[in-house]
Image (cartoon, rainbow, N blue to C red):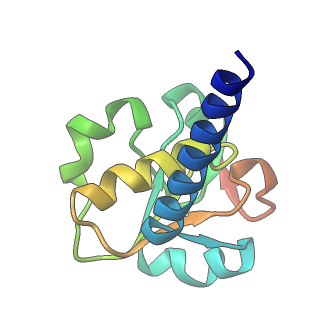
């Protein structure tokens, strides 16, 4: 029984390591300062749900929720840099992995997500 538990644990750790490596290759994590430097020349995509977006978002962002990304990814140009963010960074990381599979190459995400954003915001 102990060997089974150890095998499962090792398997989970290996999976987590592989996912972290794939994520690091797919997306560049940017500090807020780095994000501010480049997002005006890029496609700024908020992958949070519409209710979250309406409550407050980075000025100039388009809302393409992660739940709709598979149907709407064609709205994002693959030849221009893409700046992604969500509330904490988890959804934007998954969105970046998906876009990487669709051969997008210039993928960036806001480190720590919108939760830590202190720049200009707009709300409805």
Q: Is residue 68 above or below residue 91?
A: above
x, y percentage for residue 46?
50, 49
Q: Is residue 40 left or right of residue 67?
A: right
Q: Is residue 13 left or right of residue 68?
A: right
What's the residue at 50%, 60% (across, down)?
23
Tell me the quarter of the picture where residue 101 sits: bottom left
* Foreground of the two, 35 or 121: 35
Q: Is residue 100 above or below residue 38?
A: above
* Foreground of the two, 28 or 22: 22
Pick the quarter of the image with the N terminus.
Answer: top right
Pick the quarter of the image with the C terminus.
Answer: top right
x, y percentage for residue 14?
57, 48
What's the residue at 51%, 55% (across, down)?
18
Q: Is residue 31 above or below residue 44?
A: below
* Foreground of the two, 13 or 42: 13
Identity of the residue furthest to the top in this view = 1
What's the residue at 52%, 49% (across, down)?
92
x, y percentage for residue 77?
23, 65
x, y percentage for residue 109?
56, 63
What is the tally of numbered marks visible in this picture? 0
What's the residue at 51%, 52% (across, down)?
19
Q: Is residue 124 visible?
A: no
């Amino acid at each position: 029984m102990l060997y089974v538990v150890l095998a499962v644990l090792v398997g989970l750790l290996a999976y987590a390591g592989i996912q972290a490596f794939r994520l690091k290759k797919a997306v560049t994590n940017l500090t807020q300062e780095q994000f501010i430097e480049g997002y005006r020349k890029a496609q700024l995509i908020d992958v949070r749900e519409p209710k979250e977006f309406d409550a407050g978002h980075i000025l100039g962002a388009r809302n393409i929720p992660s739940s709709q990304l598979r149907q709407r990814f064609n709205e994002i140009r693959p030849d221009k840099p893409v700046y992604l963010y969500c509330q904490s960074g988890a959804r934007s990381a998954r969105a970046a992995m998906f876009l990487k599979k669709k051969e997008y190459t210039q993928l960036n995400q806001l480190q720590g997500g919108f939760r830590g954003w202190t720049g200009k915001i707009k709300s409805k």
